[in-house]
Image (cartoon, coloured by chain):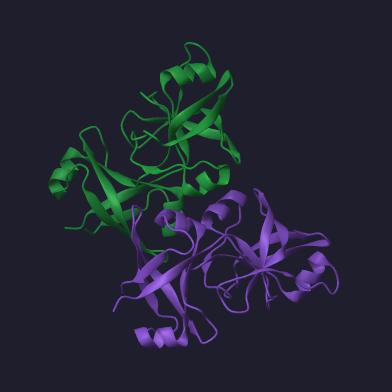
Chain colours: A green, B purple
Amino acid sequence: MTKTVPVGVSARHIHLSQAHVEALFGAGYELTEFKPLSQPGQFAANETVAVKGSKGAFPKVRILGPARKATQLEISRTDAFAIGVPAPVRESGNIAGSAGITITGPAGELTIEEGVIVAARHIHFHTDDAARWGIEDQQLLNVRVGGERGLVFENVIARVSDSYALDMHIDTDEANAAGVKNGDTAEIVG
Amino acid sequence: MTKTVPVGVSARHIHLSQAHVEALFGAGYELTEFKPLSQPGQFAANETVAVKGSKGAFPKVRILGPARKATQLEISRTDAFAIGVPAPVRESGNIAGSAGITITGPAGELTIEEGVIVAARHIHFHTDDAARWGIEDQQLLNVRVGGERGLVFENVIARVSDSYALDMHIDTDEANAAGVKNGDTAEIVG
C-alpha cells in the first residue's frame, strides 16, 4: 500500500501565549485571522512581531494563532545561525531548556528564556489515516521525497489525533535540501 | 565494506574569471590566499564581493580561487529565495541558461547573464578511492547521514580525478536539514 502524504513547508513563525499577545500588542488584544492553516482551527494571523538574537534580527515574523499556553518561536537552522540563537531541534511543545530571544511588538518588548526551537520534522495523521496505515502516535518514520534533490528523511515523528489533518511538516532548510514546495507529496517508506 | 566520507559544507561563495577579477578589483589584480580548501590548489581568497538580486543582496560573498574560466556564484535555495534569484540546481561548471546577478567589487560593478547556481551535491573521489570502492565518475550515489536529523541523500554525483581529495560537498540547506557540520562523516549506502 502506497502511503502518500502532502508536504507543508513551515517558514519561521511564532506562537504566543495570550499574556504575551497582550504584552506585545496591548491589554485585551486578540489575534486576528489572516488565513486558515492545514490543521483545523489553526490560522496565520495578520499580526507579526520582530525577534532579535545575539547576531541579528528578523523584523517581521508571522504569528500563528490561536494563542497557546506557551510562547514558541520556530526557526530553521539557517535562521538560527543567521541571528545567533542556539535553537535545539525539538518537537513542538517541548521547550524546556531551549533557546531564548527578545520579541518586539507595537506595544512592548519582552525576552523569553526558552521557547526558541528548530521544529523536528513530523507528520500529522488523523486517527483514521493512522489506523488504516498501521501507524502509531510518536512512531519514527522514514519518508521519501523524489526528484533531482530526492532524499529519505529519517526520524520523522508521527503525531496522531482526531483533530489533525494529514500533512507532513518540514522547515525551509529541509524543503530546500529536498527541492520540495508546499503541496508536493512524499511517501512513507518505512 | 563501509564507505565513509568526510562532509564539507559549502557556504555561499563565488568563483571569478580573471577578467572579472580585474573588472571588480582593478587591472592586473590577482586574488590573494586567505586559507587553503580541501581540494588541492583551491583556496578561500581574502577578497569578497557584493551580489545583488531582484529582492535583496549579500554584501560580502567570499571568493574562492584560483580564477576560473567562467564566473560562477554558488548559493543555497534559501539564499536564492532571499535575494530573488531563480538559480537552478546544477553541477559545477554547467552554467548554460542558469540565473544572472549583479556583482560589485571595490573597483567596479558588472552583471552576468548566467552563472548563478545551486550546486548539486557531490563527492570528490581521488582515483584510488573510487577504484577501491568500485565507483565511477558521474555515478549517482545514495549517501546516509545519521543523528537526530538523519537522512539519505539520493542523486549524489561522484566526481573522480587524481587531483581530488575525498570529500562530500553539500550546501548549507542540506547540512542544516541533516544536522551535520564540517568534518562530520557520511556513509555511501548505494
**Is A51 or A6 nearer to us in this picture?**
A51
Residue B111 in the image: x percent, y percent? 74, 63
**Is B63 or A61 nearer to us in this picture?**
B63
For residue B49, side relative to residue A17 (left or right): right
Seen at 57% across and 19% down, the residue is A108
Q: Quadrant of the N terminus of chain B?
A: bottom left
Q: Quadrant of the C terminus of chain B?
A: bottom left
Residue B104 in the image: x percent, y percent? 76, 59
Q: Using the image, determine if residue A32 lies above or below residue B23.
A: above
Q: Using the image, determine if residue A56 lies above or below residue B113.
A: above
**What residue occupies the far right of the structure in this picture?**
B27
Seen at 85% across and 68% down, the residue is B26
Q: Using the image, determine if residue A97 lies above or below residue A143.
A: above
For residue A152, side relative to residue A112 (left or right): left
**Residue A175 appears in view:** no
Counting the numbered discs, the total is 0
Residue B16 in the image: x percent, y percent? 70, 70
**Residue B102 appears in view:** yes
Quarter location, residue A107: top right
For residue A45, side relative to residue B187 (left or right): right
Quarter location, residue A189: bottom left
Residue A30 in the image: x percent, y percent? 45, 17
Seen at 60% across and 41% down, the residue is A55
